[in-house]
Image (cartoon, rainbow, N blue to C red):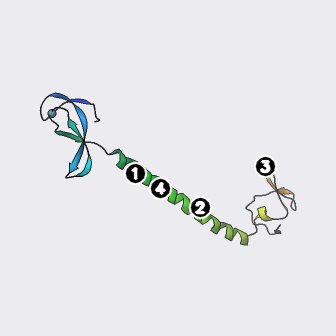
C-alpha cells in the first residue's frame, strides 16, 4: 500500500484513497500511517523508509567491519611472511607479468614458495 492508492474504506465504506498521515503521540511523532481520505481512519501502517534505510546501512557497516577486520589482519600476515623465505623476496626471483621465474633454478616458481635456496634481496 502506498499514498494515493485507491480503495474502498473498511471504516466508512466509501471509495477513498490512501493519504499519508503522521501518527502522533502527544507532540512526538511515532510514525507514519496510511489513512482514509474521507474519514481519516487508519488503514495501514506506512513502512518507515528511514528505518529500512538504516537497516541497510547497518548491514553495510557490518560488512565494512568485516572487511576492515580483514585489513587489520593484513600487516600480521606480512610480518609472519618476513620470517619465511618466500621466492618473491628472493634475490633469484624475477617477476614477469604473467609468470614468475627463479633465476637460480631456471624454472617457473610460485612467488609464495618457501625456497631452500632463498637469499634475501
Ligand atoms: Zn473512510
Classify residue 49 by image quadrant.
top left
Residue sitting nearer the eye, 3 or 105 = 3
Check the image and name the residue furthest to the front.
Answer: 27
Q: Is residue 10 left or right of residue 21?
A: left
Mark 3 or mark 1: name the one nearer the start of the chain: 1
Residue sitting nearer the eye, 104 or 59 = 59
Mark 4 or mark 1: name the one nearer the start of the chain: 1
Classify residue 110 by image quadrant.
bottom right
How crowded is the residue under tag 4: few (<14 C-alpha within 10 Å), some, or many (20+)? few
Mark 3 or mark 4: name the one nearer the start of the chain: 4
The residue indicated by pointer 3 is: 97
**Residue 103 in the image: x percent, y percent?**
87, 59
Classify residue 10 by image quadrant.
top left
Disc 4 beta carbon < 8 A from ligand 1? no
Q: Is residue 53 left or right of residue 4?
A: right
Q: How far apart are the two marked residues, 3 and 4, measured between alpha carbons? A: 36 Å
The residue indicated by pointer 1 is: 54
Q: Is residue 70 left or right of residue 25?
A: right
The residue indicated by pointer 2 is: 71
Mark 1 or mark 2: name the one nearer the start of the chain: 1
Discs 3/4, front: 4
Amino acid at each position: 500500500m502506498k499514498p494515493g492508492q485507491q480503495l474502498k474504506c473498511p471504516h466508512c465504506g466509501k471509495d477513498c484513497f490512501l493519504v499519508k498521515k503522521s501518527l502522533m503521540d502527544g507532540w512526538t511523532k511515532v510514525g507514519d500511517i496510511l489513512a482514509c481520505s474521507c474519514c481519516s481512519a487508519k488503514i495501514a501502517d506506512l513502512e518507515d523508509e528511514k528505518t529500512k534505510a538504516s537497516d541497510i546501512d547497518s548491514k553495510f557497516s557490518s560488512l565494512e567491519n568485516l572487511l576492515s577486520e580483514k585489513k587489520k589482519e593484513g600487516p600480521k600476515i606480512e610480518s609472519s611472511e618476513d620470517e619465511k623465505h618466500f621466492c618473491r623476496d628472493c634475490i633469484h626471483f624475477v617477476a614477469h607479468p604473467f609468470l614468475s621465474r627463479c633465476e637460480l633454478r631456471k624454472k617457473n616458481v610460485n612467488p609464495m614458495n618457501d625456497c631452500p635456496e632463498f637469499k634475501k634481496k
